[in-house]
Amino acid sequence: MNETTMPVNGTARRVGPDSSTDPAPVNTDRTTVNRERPVVNKPSVDDGAKKPSAAVRLVQLARERYRFVVSTDGRPYAVAVDGPNIALPLRGRSGVRQRLARLYADTFEGDVASQSALADAMTVLEGIAEDSDPVPVHLRVGHDEAGTLVVDLGTADGRAVTVSAGGWEVVDRSPVLFRRSGAMAPMPTPILIGDGLAMFYGLLNMDESSFRRLVAWTIAAWIPTIPHPVLTLKGEQGTAKSKTAQMVVNLVDPSPAAKRSQPRDAKAWATQAFNSWALCLDNVSVLPQWLSDTLCKAVTGDGIVDRALYTDDDVVVLSFRRVLAMTTIDAGALAGDLAERLLLLDLELIDDSKRRSEEELDTAFATVRPAVLGSLFDLLAAVLVVLPGVKLESMPRMADFARVLAAVDQVMEWNTLDDYLAASANVAGDALEGDPFGSALAALVERCGTWTGTAAQLLEQVPPPGGIRPPSWPKDATRAGGKVKRLAPLLRSIGITVDDTQRSQDRHRSRLLVLTRTDLPEKTASAPDQGPLWPDVAPIGQGRRAPDLD
């Protein structure tokens, strides 16, 4: 045979006629390979299997532990299968992404998911959430299909307070889905011990009438389906406006930052409103027009449309109704349309001998807060019994809130509705006096009785005071017409009607403004008096419940 030898890798090997080289010996004993470094979670080379990617593993871990939903405003959330009924955002500091990263590292020791793997997994999970129908996701306060009110205690175990007609209780798991934010703080568990309302009154600096309206506003703040007037605490320096506002907000929706400064723009405001159910703007002196309009929208529940994050053509809708509070020295500086949505409470000057330190007030409030909450929930449950039957002879601007006041009056034998209506008329008058153009219009109608003309003629008829035009004074006829429409509710509160439906008889057919002096309406009547709803038993705050109405 024609065999030759050729050096192969330094060793003489035989080469056959087919010019092939004999294979070198292969160590088939796998026990001697990588004896010092065993392979973990690595498929065998022989079976050809491929290790799942980190993104696939992350999705698998997430689907085993969470169900995925999308809220009515289009945001995806994850809800733990065996956990509290809390909606967790997929991204963010407290979201599922961070939890999955840690879970991955704990499950696959020595392996950490990369940022790209986490991003890919989040995209898949968002798609899973989009496959389901939108569900309501509440913030601090919600209600179920039966109308039962639910208040999230904000605790890690997901406990909540449920309030229905006649009673309330603390439940271990919320019946509705809540989301949390970094602006929220836990609420203490309410208890029934003593008269919590009297305990709360002892911490505040206001008269009895103001306190009763404050109590009614507080329980209405847990009814998410109605608009709530902006609680406005007014008083000079040294009346404890800020401290009072802080305590009230921390009853309704506890927060590490119960008091906020004015937002710089609409986007900053939307961020604050999205993360808190109750907000307080502290030390308000003048509100810019955009903020006044935005607060009005937050009262009525209108939405804000904004561009979706990381997209050029998609949008998200921030639709929310919020519970708002403000502290101010002069409520007359507020815009007229907002003035109609205020619940104004005057605070009294505190005598130096009765002033208490901040630390003392904080300690006292922390001590009585569980009892105060118990009394407030007790009152809310009693109000829900009578609220469906409350009818008002005439409906004011904040009609739903007025019905709550009437229900509180029936339960407690108070007079909060009449006090609220009287105070609202005073606020409208103060706001009108704070507007130079509005004051000029009121003076014009007072002289003429009825004035008719175009907006341009109106500007000529009411020159600026002292010949110097204030910043809020309309610059032209178009702005003058719009200003009159904006002031119409305030003018109506002092007996001046505005009609802009008529046209001039000449060929120009110009729009006419007709300002007419009318008699002020009689005081709005509340619901008719009714007998006591239950026998003489323990007062609100000591476990009282409405009787069986069957």
Image (spheres, grey):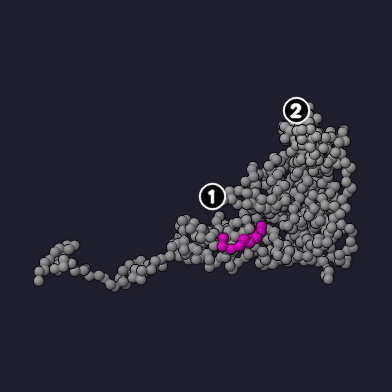
Query: Main structural element of the magenta stretch: helix, strand or loop?
Result: loop
- Whether 124 is among the magenta residues is no
Q: Where is residue 532 in the image (x, y as percent from the top left)?
A: 88, 63
Question: Earlier along the polypeptide chain: callout 1 or callout 2?
Answer: 1
- Residue 468: assigned label: 2
- Most foreground residue, 442 or 64: 442
What's the CA distance linking mark 1 and mark 2?
A: 48 Å
User: Which residue lies at the image location 11% right of the left edge and 66% below the top edge?
Assistant: 4
Disc 2 marks a residue whose amino acid type is Ile
User: Which residue lies at the image location 85% right of the left edge and 47% below the top edge?
Assistant: 422
- Whether 131 is among the magenta residues is yes
**Up/down of 53 relative to 345, above or below:** below
Q: What stretch is highlighted in magenta?
A: 130-139
User: Which residue lies at the image location 65% right of the left edge and 49% below the top edge?
Assistant: 304
- Residue 311: assigned label: 1
Quarter holding residue 545:
bottom right
Residue farthest toward the front in the current orientation of the protein: 507
**Up/down of 159 relative to 271, above or below:** below
Q: How crowded is the residue under tag 1: few (<14 C-alpha within 10 Å), some, or many (20+)?
A: few
Residue 181 visible somewhere in the drawing: yes
Left-right relation of 153 to 57: right
Q: In which quarter of the image is the N terminus?
A: bottom left
Q: Where is residue 294 in the image (x, y as percent from the top left)?
A: 69, 46
Quarter holding residue 377:
bottom right
Q: How crowded is the residue under tag 2: few (<14 C-alpha within 10 Å), some, or many (20+)?
A: few
Q: Position of residue 323 (x, y in %)?
A: 72, 52
Q: Position of residue 11 (x, y in %)?
A: 16, 64
- Residue 269: assigned label: none
Whether residues under marks 1 and 2 lie with C-beta atoms below 8 angstroms apart, the answer is no
- Most foreground residue, 93 or 313: 313
**Up/down of 506 relative to 193, above or below:** above
